[in-house]
Image (spheres, rainbow, N blue to C red):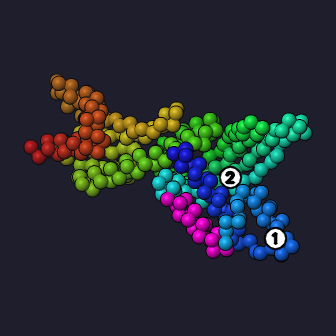
Amino acid sequence: MDAELAEVRALQAEIAALRRACEEPPAPWEEKSRVQKSFQAIHQFNLEGWKSSKDLKNQLGHLESELSFLSTLTGINIRNHSKQTEDLTSTEMTEKSIRKVLQRHRLSGNCHMVTFQLEFQILEIQNKERLSSAVTDLNIIMEPTECSELSEFVSRAEERKDLFMFFRSLHFFVEWFEYRKSTFKHLKEKYPDAVYLSEGPSSCSMGIRSASQPGFELVIVWRIQIDEDGKVFPKLDLLTKVPQRALELDKNRAIETAPLSFRTLVGLLGIEAALESLIKSLCAEENN
């Protein structure tokens, strides 16, 4: 993901430069050499390889298609980006061949249905031997979304000033969110009498009711968690709602051990198959 995101940003910079080159009117003959040298110095492009504006437009189209492919692959689409640069190099630094630059970035985009805005600063220090850069400030603004589980992760990413973790984890979080949503919707449509979604398919819980045994319910709580390192993983728990009389008659403690048994089932069958197995077992009891 890190390499893909870096490639996206590089392609965007090239696209912006090529677009400006395509739209730039021809300079007067006496200014032609100066304009070409200036363009090369800023964008580091070799214009000798371009035969006409048609070549530039063809290359622009190619780069845009590559960017579209990467956006489709990662699910991350950057819509707007702006940058301001401030030279912080002092006279003393100049004498030592050290350059210090602060970049202020603002961008907006989305990862599937999740929309975000980022404001961040990157401090670059370059000497004769190497170039180092670090994110010195990060502010993440998330648009109102169904993904309430993201709030804690966003705060952690801001605190760590970790852009790569934000994009990487957001990508995998959205994949799990969409999978949970589609699974809940599928089971509700397949077992409409047994399954209920009190907050819709986008919620983190699904209920299973027994029509033949009033008061007996199973609730699946499916959370999407992001750990300290940004790893995204699902966590499923089974909650039981049963009448007190049923608990007293449960001599084998099947109800008490049901949550642990459910986790074992998920490990053996996978999430979707385990949920369907649970629903079928409850429906089978009703049919007997």
Residue that badge 2 annotates: 106
Q: Residues within 10 Å of mark 1 (few under 14, many from 20)?
A: few
- On the image, the x and y values in percent for residue 129 come to 74, 36
Q: Amino acid at mark 2?
A: Arg
Query: Disc number at residue 60?
Result: none
- Which of the 4 image quadrants contains residue 236? top left
Q: Is residue 54 magenta?
A: yes
Vertical side of 186 occupied by 261: above or below: above
Q: Secondary structure at mark 1?
A: helix
Quadrant containing the C terminus is top left
**Extreme residue in the right direction:** 91
Residue that badge 1 annotates: 32
Q: Residues within 10 Å of mark 2 (few under 14, many from 20)?
A: some
Q: Earlier in the sequence, mark 2 or mark 1?
A: 1
Magenta region: which residues? 52-69
Q: Is residue 50 left or right of residue 143?
A: right
Q: Residue at x 80, y 48 (%)?
A: 86
- On the image, the x and y values in percent for residue 186 come to 29, 54
